Amino acid sequence: MTTDLTNLALDNQLCFAFYSVSHAFNRAYRRLLEPLGLTYPQYVVLLVLWEQDELTVKEIGERLFLDSGTLTPLLKRLEGAGHIRRTRDRKDERQVRIHLTESGRALRERAKEVPFQVGCMLGMSADEARALTQEVAKLRGRLHDSASLPPDP
Amino acid sequence: MTTDLTNLALDNQLCFAFYSVSHAFNRAYRRLLEPLGLTYPQYVVLLVLWEQDELTVKEIGERLFLDSGTLTPLLKRLEGAGHIRRTRDRKDERQVRIHLTESGRALRERAKEVPFQVGCMLGMSADEARALTQEVAKLRGRLHDSASLPPDP
DNA sequence: AAGAAATAGGTTGCGCACAATTTAATTCGC
DNA sequence: GCGAATTAAATTGTGCGCAACCTATTTCTT
């Protein structure tokens, strides 16, 4: 009884903790990224491209768990800012390949202090951060799995 | 050197883990709340009101870390759906008090299975969930503290 | 008591996030 | 080889989340 209610409240609390901490992260990054004219989602797209250029929209979406409805307008804004170019793949005209411009590559240098500054706000060791990251990623995986199942497993 | 770069990547990874897991939670709740005609943010506002009715917009915002720019339109939608009423406080006309309607109170019953169903997706014990919730909340607190400081502490 | 400062809530504008749908290109089945 | 099914991206519409700004009310100062 009491235990059940407590557990039920807990599931809500856990979700809310992630909901609110992701907003807190977003606000923290906003201040750091504003001088670069980037939002956090734009920044993570660039992180992906800095690691591997010439990806398709779909490949970026798979890495970030985002779909074209989110990425297409975001990528158009990054193109408008001059950081990337979007070109149809000549081999498969359905695909759009994203590649960095000189300006996009140059941003990497200007952004290299950002993770360090965020790291200062975390108040935890690298090992703790590593462990927490893994635990959260595992949880995300389970949620994705549940989402791909029929309504009531 | 290598250690530094690894740590820098880690801070990004931790933030991204929260960013993506909160989307995953959002999608999970969306399916459960859709029959009730609620979004997750609307649901958490109702959770707060089910706990304590007659709160002001500001008090709701303090509990959820949201401001009036987010809450005002959301509350208007909840009012449009008939779940709450918004009335100016007669003692202090600046404040707007939110109170549940009969429909809003009745929703609580219909929503009572939701946390349990989410709990099933978590794949962790109540103790693990409790510990994780606390750790994430502590991190959120530190981020809020950092945010209220001057640019470079 | 009168003006200044603070406070609560609302408004505007922008950028996600995502469901649902559409369009165009490619691949599959026969 | 040709129509059907599949796939990639774009489009449309809704709802946050927040900064910046505005309005109305209350409180502070003197």
Image (spheres, coloured by chain):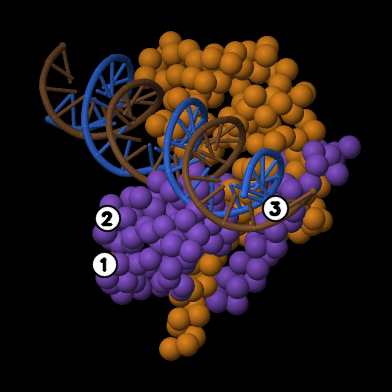
Chain colours: A orange, B purple, C blue, D brown
**Tag 1–tag 2 contact (CB < 8 Å):** yes
Mark 2 touching mark 3, by CB under 8 A?
Answer: no
Nearest to the observer: residue D12 or residue A107: D12
Q: Which residue is mark 3?
A: B144
| 1 or 2: tag closer to the N-terminus | 2
Please, what secondary structure does the residue beneath circle 3 have? helix
Q: Is residue B6 left or right of residue C15?
A: right
Badge 1 is on which residue?
A: B103
x 49%, y 44%: residue: B69
Which residue bears the numbered disc 2?
Answer: B81
Residue visible at 31% across and 74% down? Answer: B109
Mark 3, Cα crowd under 10 Å, few <14 / some 14-19 / many 20+, is some
On the same chain, marks 2 and 3? The answer is: yes
Seen at 77% across and 30% down, the residue is: A112
Question: Could you say where residue D26 lies in the image, as x and y percent from the top left?
Answer: 57, 57
The CA distance from mark 3 to mark 1 is 35 Å
Q: Is residue D1 above or below residue B22?
A: above
Q: Secondary structure at mark 2?
A: loop
Q: Residues within 10 Å of mark 2 (few under 14, many from 20)?
A: few
Disc 2 or 3, which lies upstream in sequence?
Answer: 2
Q: Residue furthest right?
A: B1
Where's residue B7, x and y in %?
Answer: 79, 44
Q: Are marks 1 and 2 on the same chain?
A: yes
